[in-house]
Image (tube, rainbow, N blue to C red):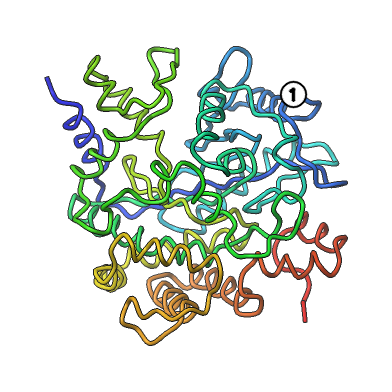
Amino acid sequence: MKSSKTILKDYFKSGEKAGKKIGVEFEHFLISKTDLRSYEYFEENGQKQLMNQLVSTGWEVQYSEGDDIFNAVKAGNMVSFEPGGQVEISIKPFERIHDIEVEYLSVRNEIDALLSDDQMLISLGYHPKTKIETLPLLPKKRYQFMYDELHKRGNFARNMMKGTASTQVSIDYEDEKDFIKKYRVANFLAPFISRLFDASPIFEGAVYAAKNLRVRIWDHTDINRCKMPKGAMDQQFDYDAYSDYILNSEPILMIEGDQSYLTDHQTVADLDHDKPLSKVQLVHASTMVFPDVRVKQFLEIRVADALPLPYSLAVPALIKGIFYNTDNLDKYYKLSLNMDDDGVLKLNDQIKESYSFEMGCLHLSMTCDDFIGMLILDATNGLDSDEMEILMYFQEMIQKYESYSEYLKKIYLEDQALFKKVITTGGEHVQIQ
């Protein structure tokens, strides 16, 4: 009989692919156009009704509890709900960013056709109006277990669950050597990607004074299962090391058939020692950690905020241009060798305060923003011309306003009616002096 560690290693190895596809998960808030409040699951035109309508138009139920449907799939795409009712659209993998856009818009058109005149989906890193204490948790058993337990382990765990939204990008790895390189580079670049795609101007109804709100929230959401596994930059993090990370994690809950049960502070290894876990249970355990870079049968880079089109497409464009270009991947792998765990954690802290700090840790005579500029330039060189334009359009915006978040903060402080108009239409619509 295979050990649980071997089962996990085999699971990660089975994800090896020679292709270069990109998968993207776009998260949104379902809000009222009138007052920006969040819709609640059970109310008229709420998420429950929306999902039932999707299923009635041909979407297939993937996961439900009783008569509550939480995941539905169609043509390889998925619509699901996060704990606070955030609507996640997961697009099947493509090689070209244009194909991702077309597929996303196709799903959006289906959803938008079902919304009332007062409703819309918006993309921001944190909810612009509704405070999380007033927002009911979705009636999903897993979410209730997590909501109760994570709150004991991090002051902002509930903010994370109900108040945040992201753009998550998944990339393939060819073999274990490629996995090691991409995993290291992804963790090294995570603070910079967070900085670049900061889109969280409002926190609990007020302008957030610092930068990168979601970074702060994740820093205070059970640090042992979030941010970065210990040793990720201190050693060669291979399938074996990541399997150890999963085995030493505390899953909060474990599944058995169609039932779930709390595991308190037992680790996966503890549970496996008491009663050998199945592959299904071990794979479940691998989804109960939330690091910046998570491994399934692909690498999931989870640090970008939710952004409106076309800015959201800059996230997969940047990642494609760096990770699927051999020269770029090699360049940033070599730079990452200057860093250890503490170095990445320090970068993570610095970007919450400033983007102008010096990058002496990499032996480079440049600021963080200079490094970002280099990263974008290198990425564009690894893209087709139409994909390059997506990234350059996004770069024009951040050169004017520092980040999408800072752009929205300026609008909010000057004219809240205009702020409302901008976030309910998306993208850049006004010039701020």
Quadrant of the rendered image containing residue 371: bottom left
Left or right of residue 324: residue 126: right
Residue at the spot 79% in from the left edge and 64% down from the top edge: 412
User: Percent position (x, y) of residue 218?
Assistant: 51, 49
Badge 1: few (under 14), some or many (20 or more) residues near its Cα, within 10 Å?
some
Find the residue positioned furthest to the left: 1
Quadrant the C terminus occupies: bottom right
Find the residue positioned furthest to the bottom: 365
Q: Is residue 218 above or below residue 297?
A: below
User: Percent position (x, y) of residue 19?
Assistant: 30, 52
Quadrant the N terminus occupies: top left
Q: Is residue 87 above or below residue 172?
A: above
Left or right of residue 238: residue 135: right
Residue at the spot 27% in from the left edge and 59% down from the top edge: 233
SS class of the residue under badge 1? loop
User: Percent position (x, y) of residue 310?
Assistant: 62, 62
User: Percent position (x, y) of residue 102?
Assistant: 57, 52
Nearer to us in this view, 30 or 209: 209
Quadrant of the rendered image containing residue 180: bottom left
Quadrant of the rendered image containing residue 226: top left
Residue at the spot 75% in from the left edge and 70% down from the top edge: 410
**On the image, numbered disc 1 is attached to which residue?**
42
Q: Is residue 113 above or below residue 320?
A: above
Q: Please give the count of numbered marks on the rendered protein.
A: 1
Indicate the amino acid at tag 1.
Phe
